[in-house]
Amino acid sequence: MEILVCIKQVPDTAENDIELAKGGRDIDREDMVYSINEWDNYAVEEAIQLRDKVGGSITVVTIGDEEADDVLRRQLAMGADRGLHVCDQALAGSDGLGLATILAAVARQGKYDLILTGAQADDCAGQVGGMLAALLDVPFAALVNQVEVKGQGVLRIGREVAGGDQEISEIDLPCVLSIQTGINQPRYVGIRGIRKVASVEIPQLDAPALGLDPASVGDKAARLKRLDYFVPQGGPGAQMLTGKPDQLAAQLVEILKAKGGLR
Amino acid sequence: MEAVILSPGMLLPTQMLSLVLTLLGLGIFGYLLRRRLAPLSLASPDLRPGTWGQRLAGLLKYWLAQYKQPRYPLAGLLHILLFLGFLVLSLRTLTLILIGFWDGFTLPGLSGQAGHFYALIKDYTATLVLVVVVVAGVRRGLFKPARYAVPPQYGHDHTGEALLVLGFIATLMISESLFEASLQAALNQAGQAGEPPAPGSLAWLMTLALAGTARDTLQGLHLGGYFLHDLAFFGFLCLLPLGKHFHVLTSLPNVLFMKLKKGTVKPVRWGVGEDKLDDLESFGVKKFEDFTWKHMLDFYSCADCGRCSDNCPANAVGRPLSPRFLTIKARDYAFAHYPLSGANLEPEPLVGGIYSEDEIWSCTTCGACEEECPLMIEYIDKIVDLRRGLVDEGEVPASLQAPFKALDKRGNPFGKKEKARADWSQDPDFAAQVEVKLLAEGEHAPALYFVDSITSYDPRMQDIARATARLLQACGIDFGILGKAERDSGHEVRRFGEEMLFQALKEQNTEAIAESGATRIITADPHAFNALKKDYALSQPVEHISQTLQQALAEGRLSFKPLAQPGLVYTLHDPCYLGRHNGLYAPARQVLDAIPGLKRVEMARSQDRSFCCGGGGLMLFYEPVEEARMGQKRVEMAAAAGADVIVTACPFCLVNIEDAIKTSGLEGKMRVMDLTELASAQLG
């Protein structure tokens, strides 16, 4: 099975104190560390497990600047077979449809049976997978938490639906699935693994190489634009606690006791 | 003069029989030994650094003098007596075997007076050994000490094997005495002197009992006793490589090649330098053959005495780890995969086979098992090697992946920013009293205070950092910290098997330390202390704050005011990496005893038998399968000792014990504090 996994480099929420940048259109990126989008990591692990079961190969692709090479290498160390790095300043500022357009161009250059994306990334839009499927005119399933190969050209997939119930579906290949966290336990990638793939050649692709019409991608083509970014104001009923951790905990306990949440 | 009765070495048929038995016994034994040693030739290398002088000293102390045995008084006494019996009687046994076909043989040096003296000694020894065997048999078969029990998940009970071996030893003692006594009884009947057995010994009693027995019967008993001894001896010899009594033979090389440097961790592969690690195909132990030959010898040498697991805190709280069975399962694997006959079996993965992942991650590397083992069997290096194998395969629990990643990106397991590392020193009240220099930012001081991650970032543990800084200032030590240039010492990173991450952290710290220009390093974290001292190759001396304080007290540079609240009882909890791994038991106690009015008691398990608090470093992140918390058990031990205050000297012990006091419902009744907190509060 030939699998394409679309991955993204995002600010690591565990290792950064996320604060808004002054302009109000982005977060403060000074002293920021990046890592692979968590959902994408599960998608790559799922691809590895599928490949190890039924054979084939895995390509990981990312759209991003030179630094994004890091996440590709990490996923190669994890077990992906090859990486593709779409790196072109002309593509910066693409909206979800723009990104899906770029990924569709990448997908058309190969022959993939299965395309995986994470269910969502740092911007919580969760739209690229579905648009990519539409552009490629293949079926799509979102928030997949279970994948089994069911005979030739068919997958059996599971999704958690409202109330925590599990829904099982069949989907024809080729298809696009957006993967939910918890579908597996992603393996650990150590420094040693990353060093082993340090010299692996990762082809860089730009808009011309992908045959992209410059008018369909990049910030000029974006029809969805971010206007503002702010921390919500405390509304009525919201109470912000301040102090040292032990004081915070003590206040919280008092509140919970007072409101009957603790006896 | 004609012999009263004939000895086996006098007649051709018995001579032949003796010779055949001997050759057959040695042949079978040699064959068994060769099969058993087969996996050792496929094992990983093991260089066992150290001098022969050190090795010989270790052999004399731990093997010949049985140094660890008395830690369990009754079992220890019994073993020492049996061991001495074996040593004394080995000469007699050798002689006996040879006289079967070489009549009149005596060992060089054992003729004449020395021979008479030896005969006396060996008679009493054999008698004593028989008594010990009976006591041991009763103890093992009737009283069944709890630590010998085999929990159901670890297979069948081992009492049968133990009793079988005791039976062999008893047979050896009885047959030897019978051989002796039957001859002496016949000589007595003929009015000849012979070599009368030692009065009161087993042989002496038998001689009395046989006084009126017919000469022919005595002749039969003499030869019968001889061949029974021969059979029992070679039977016993060939039984040794088949089970736990292999230690009778392997203990000598196992102790001779024991690990000499406590607290260190073996390299990924002996003979491969740190700069060549990238060239290795695989890391750690994944299959049995990845163990080093010495570690295989460890498996063969285990006497199944159960002392390791009896002291293992992980075992005590019901984690799926028992050092005893870590060894026994590996030995069973070796026996099954390298059978005595037929082809060897294909290697199978160890984790997922005989071991579970949880078992391998459950160890806190506290070293209680190794401290206890009379045979100097190693556990920590094996656990670390197995973890290296798991890390190499990506089999790391999610709870540990997060801190590994944070350590890689930020140099601390919490994912906090590097530039916040010195924030503890910015507390306004503190900063007004104590100046903490930042050595990585152009300031100079001869002493470097290495803070390490938890003390730098954890709001509670930052109290230790401030207390340490106050004490250093009070001792008149000009010191500074590395601040944002400091990285986690990597102590647990290495012990959790992520060697390359450890190497990266070590490299960054080594460079920062060199650039700081410090000539002396002080830390209040025993894990950092052990890492800097044992894992790093630093030129500067490294000391724990308890040593610094001890020295300042001795030189009169430091003194304490009396306790504000006398009447409380204090006890010291020995941190594993200060105590067992570095032998520093006295400094912290001397500091406590220098505080006027402080009453101190010892817990039943203290010093080298200290009970781990639950583990430091990455163990704080791991979510073990367990029935109770180690810290909770430790708090109970402190309560049993009558302590109101537990003093420790390690931030991780403080975390674990503080939590345990809360979960035990003892909040308000008992408290825990770091040695530095207590000492700095008592500054004049």
Image (cartoon, coloured by chain):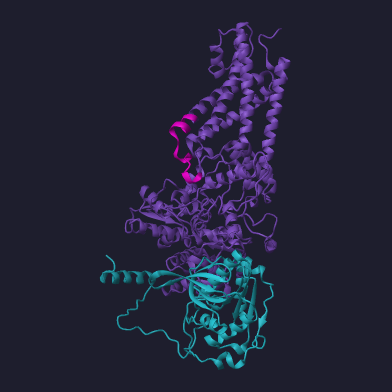
Chain colours: A cyan, B purple
Where residue B60 appears, as percent x and y from the top left, is 62, 38
| Residue sitting nearer the eye, B674 or A148 | A148
Quadrant position of the C terminus of chain B in the picture: bottom left
In the image, residue B193 above or below residue B100: above
Quadrant position of the N terminus of chain B in the picture: top right
Is residue B513 in sight in this rendering? no
B98 sits to left or right of A104: right
Queried whether the magenta region covers residue B149, the answer comes back as: yes
Is residue A260 in sight in this rendering? yes
B604 sits to left or right of B172: left
Queried whether the magenta region covers residue A40, the answer comes back as: no
A52 sits to left or right of A234: right
Where residue B430 appears, as percent x and y from the top left, is 43, 71
In the image, residue B385 above or below residue B242: below
Q: Residue at x 48, y 36 (%)?
A: B73
Dominant secondary-structure state across the stretch colored magenta: helix
Q: Residue at x 61, y 55 (%)?
A: B286
In the image, residue A88 above or below residue B214: below
Residue at the front extreme, as displayed: A152
What is the magenta range? B137-154
Where residue B508 appears, as percent x and y from the top left, is 61, 69
Where residue A59 appears, as percent x and y from the top left, is 62, 74
In the image, residue B493 above or below residue B332: below
Give the number of marks: 0
